[in-house]
Image: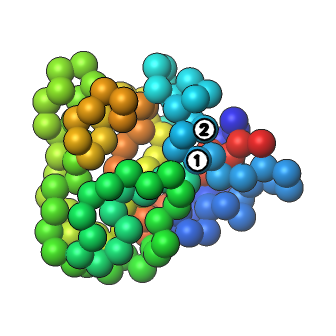
Amino acid sequence: MALCNGGGTQCTAPAACAPGWHMCLGSEYLARGGSTQSLGAYGGWLAACVRNGPDAGLAYLDHACEGCDGGTSGSIMDGTFSCQTGQDLSNQVSDSYLGLVSLAACHRLVTNDPSMAGYWTVTSSNLSYLVLCCR
């Protein structure tokens, strides 16, 4: 994995990966160490989504969100929990598309299930971050 400049939104981030590389899937990130340790890469987009469209509920998807328009829809809690304590750290959001970025702290996503633990967090897919690339 490599953290690459020029990612932009989750929708434009894949173009920042070099030829032969791709934006890391959430499952790739977890399998390559993101489930047990911080990789020191804060703010690298992952191809993973937890809210994929207006008025959608929370569900983990192992691909990038389908949109980055920054539109708003019904308010929802973003489904973020502490790995260490299970404490609900959720924020109320109304963004239509919520993607995942790597992070230096461990969070469980969506349902507070330990199988969803990783050094990542939820954010609006229209924000600008670096990108985590895999090959």
Which residue is drawn at the image coordinates 43% and 50% (left, top)? 100
For label 2, the SS is: helix
- Which label is found at residue 25? 1
Image x and y of residue 74, in percent: 16, 74
Q: Left or right of 94: which side holds 108?
A: right
Which residue is drawn at the image coordinates 22% and 47% (left, top)? 79
Indicate the quadrant where residue 97 lies: bottom left
Residue 104 visible in the snapshot:
yes
Q: Are marks 1 and 2 in contact (CB under 8 Å)?
A: yes
- Say which amino acid is labelled 1: Leu
Q: CA distance from mark 1 to mark 2?
A: 5 Å
Indicate the quadrant where residue 32 lies: top right
Q: Residues within 10 Å of mark 1 (few under 14, many from 20)?
A: many
Image x and y of residue 125, in percent: 43, 64
The N terminus is located in which quarter? top right
Q: Relative to the observer, which residue lies in front, 116 or 129?
A: 116
Per the image, the residue denoted by label 2 is 28
Q: Left or right of 4: which side holds 50?
A: left
Q: Left or right of 80: which side holds 51?
A: right
Please, is residue 59 above or below residue 41 in the view? below
For label 1, the SS is: loop
